[in-house]
Every structure is written in structure tokens, then in C-alpha cells.
């Protein structure tokens, strides 16, 4: 008689596309989507690489790379409709690509220009959230509003494994459970929060299980398996749209880069872990699969890389040719109408003495 | 004496106190093996181990609140908040709890902790990484607020902070971390709270500043040193504030310019000007000027130099005050 204590069996990791490019299940998307997945993931990696290069050359500020996490980002974002909402934190280049957020604007933000956060009217994304976990309750609030207004839009909210420690995570998920709102939380469990490993972040065996405490489902999926991510997220999005409430999806992946360009992860990431995870690369895995199905060959690959390399160069050019922000920009977007006291300061700031 | 930068000086002070008092613990995000994102706690984890240099979960409210608990229990926690912008997540615990526990228990419990926070801008960092939040802390009764301006100051003030029986907010000007190197005594020494530093004496005008701006202010003064006899005051501690040193100086010079990086409205300058009004209004020969950040959101990299008080803005302020 010990059922007055909680008992819990942690969920298993769902997977469709295995490390070697073979599949576990027939539930794979059609060829068009597969190619879109591949192209988006490759573009994510090429762009990521480019931004790091720009940073090294002093043409961009500190940047958080998405290397190795492309399947989580692309697979999840593809499960959304255009009208659905997406709340990033700051490591989702792949999701931004899928949502057709202009790459030059994505770069503009990291280059230190606020206009990079001026989301185009036809895209329901929120700007990146630097304060860890702060986006979570905002996303929940949008989902509440979508439910109350009967808009039938689903919200997707990204977060890191480290973010699960913040109060905002708890409060955001608890509200979501209580109000049974249409939201899908995507945790990119890349196993690190800067230098702190997941084992020091939580005593729980998995992140997915945290959902249980808020009264909804948690899912664990191989975050480097784009088919698996797509499938579980699509199911969760559909569930949300049908009024069946939130889901927390833990995508198990690995941060293959430094935390940001300001970090040196050699100090704390074991080399053997990187070697182990390199074999699970999400892009190579998908390419192997496509080749085995004869829907991809070296020629296609070459054409794609050429196309995307040109594309990213054009985007860099656009970002760098974007007009420099002006002093008055600091003042003009604080309120709808600038108060008189601030108008005086604005004049002072623009007086030419810098 | 050895030459140190501010990162080394703070590290050295932590090391001295940790080796003396085993109740002193350092905790925060990435302070252990990584040595902190600014490397301020470098080497301490190796020397003192997991129970004295503690990597915590990513939760600022939790870091500060559990520090309060440890402090009440007789330890001396030194929590590190990774960046200024994230100290706001701990504000509830600082304003509603750390600052009040001595008062509400009528002295039965107290909270001897030092919250270290890298603050200030000018390092091309990300959003929320360039804030100057001192006013929030200064406005809170029960907290002490310390901002060193150089390596020497950092060491002496930190050792005082750790030995202080009350909660201290210790703001580290990150722009200065590696920018200044100077001689710092290797041995233990302290700089008392509530005693501003007269960096240089002068008779024409009193320049008041602290922390991240002091270096820029010195550079500005250097350019006009032959023109005016300038008195420069480094406040060192914002709470307690050394009103006497300020008033005595104003009585001598009758003119003042106050410089800080934080936003202007209700910034330190407004408090100082008020105190001067209260105690030395009739000694003034010119209105007191404040050169500060504007009342706007601290901008991203491309605009940060337009926000920060610059050498030219400071010189212009001094000239206008002198020629009033
Ligand atoms: C509230 C807050 N505290 C601290 C930081 C500094 N910081 C930036 S990212 C990060 C780790 C985030 O880890 P995780 O949530 O796992 O996301 P990842 O970076 O691994 O993708 C920290 C501590 C921050 N941005 N916001
Ligand atoms: Mg992480």
C-alpha cells in the first residue's frame, strides 16, 4: 500500500528517421514537404555559418548559432499555418526561415538595429526574446486571446532547456493548463544552458514530464529527426486547434556550437559528446534518406547550395545596406505620441554634440 | 602592489574572503567551471569546490531568494546575476524581502549578502545587456548600493560589502572590467561605505560621477584641465550617499555637473541636486547640470554611442556651467 506517493514512468523518445537515414515508420511527409524540409535546414546552416563569419569580421554583434538544431526548428515550424503565431527565443534560425521571415531582418537584429524586430505585417511572429523564458507567458496570453476571440489560431512557443527553470516557464504553462488554450511549447533541449548541463538544471529525468504537473501532455521526440518532430508537432497543433489544449514537446538535440560567439564551449563541453552527436546530424540523416529513395542526388545538392549561397549573399547585402538607425529612433517609438518633456530631450540629443 | 584589471581585482577580493570565511559562497549562472561569463569567478570553483562556488539553475528570482535564506541562516552568499537586465527578475525578492527582513523582525534576522551585477553599456552587447538599473535599488530602503569605478576601488569596496551585515547591491561596470589596469594592494584592505572619493581637488567646479562613467569623465577633464580648476568626486556608494563631501565641495566651487549613464528621470543626479538645493542653494553660481543617458530604452549596438554621455557632451556641460 504505497499509492499515496507519486509514481512516474518517464516518456520514451519518439523517432521516425534514424541516425543512419533509415525509417522506423511509414508516417512520413510527402516528397514536396521533405524537399522543403531539406532546403530550409540547409539554408539555416548556410545562413548560420554566414552570420558567424560576419560576427568574426566585426560586421555583426554577438550571435547564437543554431548548428545541429535545424530539424527541431524546421520540423516544428512547418506544422504551423501562416495565421498561427510563433514565439521564438533567440536560437531558431530554421523556424524563421520556414515562417518566411526575411533573413536580412533576422541579421539586422543581430547587427544591433532595432528595425530587425519590426515584424512584417503578414507574419505572425513575435520578436526574439533575450530574457530567458520571458516569451512563454506572453505566448500563453496570445493563446488565451485566440481562444476567447474564437480565432482558431494556434500558438507555438519555443524555449530552451534552461528556460524551464525560470518562474515564467511555470507560470506560463500553468495558465495554459488552467485555461486549456491552443498552444504548443517546443523545448529545444540542446542539453546546455551556456555551461550548465541539463543535469544541473533539473532533477527531473525529462523535460516532457513537467507537463504532467500542469495537467497536460508532454512529448519527447528525437530533435534531430525532422520527420519525427514534424509528426508530433503536427499532432499537437491539430489537438490544440480542436480545443484539446496545450502540449509540451521536448525535442532532444544537442548544441553543436558555442553558446554564442562570445562563449568558448571547449572549456566545458566534452569533445566525445560532440563526436557522438555529430553522427546524429539532422541534415546528413535526411540527405541519406532522400538519396536512398532516389529523390535527391549530387547534382540537386550542388544546385541547391549554389542557389542558397547566392541567396544569403543577397540578404547580407540588403542587411548591410539597410539605413543606419537615427538618433530620433530612440525617442520616436516609445509612445504613440511623444510627450513634451521627451521632445525636449530629443532636441538635445539631436543637437549635434555626440 | 600588483597591476590588476577590475575582473582580477574582484576575483582577488572574493578569493581573500572565501579563504578567510567558509560561510562565504558564490552562486549563480555559469559561475563554476566556466568561471562566469565575464570570468570574474575564474579559478574559484577549482579551489573551493561545488559547495562554495555553485552553478545554479537559470532563475534569478530563485538565486536571490535562496541567497536570502542562506544569509538568514548565517552564511554569506554572494549571488551573481549574469547581466543587469536580468536583475529585474530578482527585484521582487530584493524590494519585498531582502531589504525588509531586518526591519520586520526588528533585528532578529538580517540578510548579509552581496548581489554582484555586471551593469552598464558600451560593449556591443545584446538587448537587455546594457542597462544601468541603480535607481531601482537606490530607491529601496534597506539596500546598500555600491558601484566601483576602478580595480582598486572594486577590491576595497567588495571586501567592505562582504563584511557588511546588510544586503548590498554591488554593480560592476562591465565596460571598465578590462579597460583600466592599475596598482592594487595584494593584501586585504577595505574602503568604507558612505565616504566619497575626491579624485582630484579643484576650485572652479565640482564634477560628480561614479562607476562606468568615471573613466570617460576623467578623459573629458583631461582635455580642459588647463582651462579650469576642477574638483572630481567619485561617489563610490550611492546608498549610503556621502552628502557632506558633496556639500563641502559645492560650498567651495559653487558650480557642479553630475554625470551618469542611467536614464535621467529620477536618476542619481536628481537626488544630488535636491540635496544641494536643501543645503547649499545660496552657494550656487550657476544651475547644476546633469549629463546622463536619455529617458529612452537603452538602444542596441548601433545607437549605443548616441545614448551614452560622451566626452564632448561632458565638456559642453562643463563649459556651459562655467560660462553661465
Ligand atoms: C533571464 C535571463 N537570465 C540569463 C540570461 C543569460 N543567458 C542567455 S542564454 C542563457 C542560457 C539559456 O539556456 P537554454 O534555455 O537552454 O537555451 P539555449 O541557449 O541552450 O538554446 C543564459 C543564462 C538571459 N538571457 N536571460
Ligand atoms: Mg539549452
Image (cartoon, coloured by chain):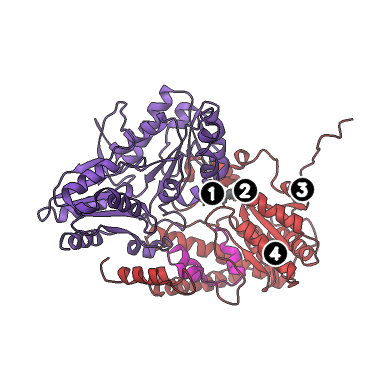
Q: Residue lying farthest left? A: B226
- On-image quarter of the C terminus of chain A: bottom left
Q: Which chain is purple?
A: B
Mark 4 or mark 2, which has the lower sequence index? 4
Q: Residue lying farthest right? A: A1
Chain of residue at mark 1: B
Q: Is residue B116 above or below residue A354?
A: above
Which residue is denoted by mark 4 in the rendering?
A: A143
Q: Which residues are magenta?
A: A90-119
Which residue is denoted by mark 1 in the rendering?
A: B89
Task: Give the residue displayed 65% in from the left and 61% down from the top.
Answer: A139
- Same subunit: marks 3 and 1: no
Disc assigned to residue A212: 3
Report whether B35 appears left or right of A122: left
Question: Viewer-nearest of labels 3 and 4?
Answer: 4
Q: Residues within 10 Å of mark 2 (few under 14, many from 20)?
A: some
Question: Viewer-nearest of labels 1 and 4?
Answer: 1
Q: Is residue A108 above or below residue B83?
A: below
- On-image quarter of the N terminus of chain A: top right
Comparing B128 with B265, the one in front is B265
- Same subunit: marks 1 and 4: no
| Magenta stretch: includes residue A92 | yes
Comparing A16 with A185, the one in front is A185
- The answer to whether mark 1 is within 8 Å of ligand 1 is yes
Q: Is residue A7 above or below residue A346?
A: above
Mark 3 or mark 2, which has the lower sequence index? 2
Under circle 3, the secondary element is helix
Mark 2–mark 1 Cα distance, whole angstroms, equals 9 Å
Q: Position of residue A252 (x, y in %)?
A: 66, 50
Under circle 4, the secondary element is helix
Task: Give the residue displayed 55% in from the left and 43% down from the top.
Answer: B96
Amino acid at each position: 500500500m504505497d499509492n499515496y506517493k507519486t509514481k512516474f514512468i518517464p516518456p520514451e523518445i519518439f523517432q521516425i528517421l534514424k541516425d543512419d537515414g533509415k525509417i522506423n515508420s511509414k508516417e512520413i511527409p510527402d516528397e514536396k514537404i521533405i524537399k522543403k524540409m531539406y532546403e530550409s535546414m540547409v539554408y539555416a546552416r548556410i545562413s548560420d555559418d554566414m552570420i558567424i563569419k560576419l560576427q568574426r569580421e566585426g560586421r555583426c554583434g554577438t550571435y547564437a548559432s543554431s548548428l545541429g538544431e535545424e530539424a527541431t526548428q524546421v520540423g516544428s515550424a512547418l506544422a504551423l499555418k501562416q495565421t498561427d503565431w510563433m514565439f521564438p527565443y533567440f536560437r531558431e534560425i530554421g523556424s524563421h526561415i520556414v515562417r518566411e521571415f526575411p533573413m536580412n531582418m533576422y541579421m539586422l537584429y543581430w547587427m544591433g538595429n532595432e528595425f530587425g524586430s519590426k515584424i512584417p505585417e503578414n507574419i505572425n511572429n513575435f520578436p526574439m526574446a533575450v530574457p530567458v523564458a520571458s516569451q512563454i507567458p506572453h505566448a500563453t496570453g496570445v493563446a488565451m486571446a485566440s481562444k476567447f476571440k474564437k480565432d482558431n489560431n494556434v500558438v507555438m512557443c519555443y524555449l530552451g532547456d534552461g528556460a524551464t527553470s525560470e518562474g515564467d516557464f511555470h507560470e506560463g504553462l500553468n495558465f495554459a493548463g488552467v485555461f486549456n488554450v491552443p498552444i504548443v511549447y517546443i523545448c529545444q533541449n540542446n542539453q546546455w544552458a551556456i555551461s550548465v548541463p541539463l543535469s544541473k538544471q533539473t532533477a527531473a529525468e525529462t523535460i516532457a514530464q513537467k507537463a504532467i504537473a500542469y495537467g497536460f501532455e508532454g512529448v519527447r521526440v528525437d530533435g534531430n529527426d525532422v520527420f519525427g518532430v514534424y509528426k508530433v508537432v503536427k499532432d499537437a497543433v491539430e489537438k490544440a486547434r480542436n480545443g484539446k489544449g496545450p502540449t509540451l514537446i521536448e525535442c532532444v538535440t544537442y548544441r553543436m556550437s558555442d553558446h554564442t560567439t562570445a562563449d568558448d564551449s571547449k572549456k566545458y563541453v566534452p569533445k566525445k559528446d560532440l563526436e557522438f552527436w555529430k553522427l546524429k546530424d539532422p541534415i546528413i540523416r535526411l540527405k541519406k534518406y532522400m538519396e536512398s529513395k532516389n529523390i535527391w542526388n549530387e547534382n540537386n545538392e550542388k544546385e541547391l547550395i549554389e542557389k542558397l549561397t547566392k541567396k544569403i549573399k543577397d540578404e547580407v547585402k540588403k542587411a548591410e545596406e539597410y539605413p543606419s538607425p537615427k538618433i530620433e529612433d530612440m525617442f520616436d517609438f516609445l509612445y504613440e505620441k511623444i510627450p513634451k518633456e521627451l521632445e525636449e530631450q530629443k532636441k538635445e540629443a539631436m543637437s549635434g554634440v555626440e | 602592489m600588483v597591476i590588476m584589471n577590475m575582473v582580477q581585482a574582484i576575483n582577488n577580493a572574493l578569493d581573500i574572503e572565501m579563504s578567510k570565511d567558509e560561510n562565504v559562497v558564490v552562486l549563480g549562472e555559469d559561475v563554476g567551471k566556466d568561471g562566469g561569463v565575464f570570468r570574474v569567478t575564474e579559478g574559484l570553483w577549482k579551489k573551493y569546490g561545488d559547495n562554495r562556488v555553485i552553478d545554479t539553475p537559470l532563475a534569478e528570482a530563485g538565486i536571490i531568494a535562496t541567497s536570502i535564506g542562506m544569509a538568514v541562516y548565517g552564511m554569506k552568499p554572494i549571488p551573481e546575476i549574469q547581466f543587469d537586465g536580468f536583475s529585474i527578475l530578482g527585484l521582487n525578492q530584493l524590494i519585498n524581502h531582502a531589504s525588509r527582513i531586518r526591519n520586520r523582525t526588528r533585528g532578529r534576522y538580517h540578510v548579509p549578502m552581496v548581489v554582484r551585477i555586471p551593469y552598464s553599456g558600451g560593449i556591443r552587447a545584446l538587448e537587455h545587456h546594457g542597462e544601468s538599473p541603480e535607481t531601482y535599488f537606490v530607491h529601496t530602503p534597506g539596500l546598500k548600493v555600491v558601484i566601483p569605478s576602478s580595480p582598486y576601488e572594486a577590491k576595497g569596496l567588495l571586501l567592505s560589502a562582504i563584511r557588511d551585515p546588510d544586503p548590498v547591491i554591488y554593480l560592476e561596470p562591465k565596460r571598465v572590467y578590462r579597460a583600466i589596469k592599475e596598482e592594487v594592494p595584494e593584501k586585504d584592505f577595505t574602503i568604507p561605505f558612505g565616504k566619497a572619493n575626491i579624485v582630484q581637488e579643484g576650485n572652479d567646479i565640482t564634477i560628480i560621477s561614479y562607476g562606468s562613467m568615471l573613466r570617460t569623465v576623467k578623459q573629458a577633464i583631461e582635455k580642459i584641465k588647463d582651462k579650469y580648476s576642477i574638483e572630481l568626486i567619485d561617489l563610490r556608494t550611492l546608498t549610503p550617499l556621502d552628502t557632506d563631501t558633496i556639500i563641502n565641495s559645492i560650498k567651495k566651487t559653487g558650480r557642479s555637473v553630475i554625470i551618469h549613464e542611467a536614464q535621467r528621470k529620477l536618476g542619481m543626479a536628481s537626488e544630488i541636486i535636491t540635496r544641494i538645493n536643501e543645503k547649499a542653494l545660496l552657494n550656487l553660481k550657476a544651475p547644476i547640470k546633469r549629463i546622463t543617458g536619455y529617458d529612452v530604452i537603452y538602444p542596441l549596438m548601433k545607437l549605443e554611442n548616441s545614448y551614452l554621455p560622451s566626452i564632448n557632451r561632458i565638456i559642453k556641460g562643463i563649459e556651459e556651467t562655467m560660462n553661465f
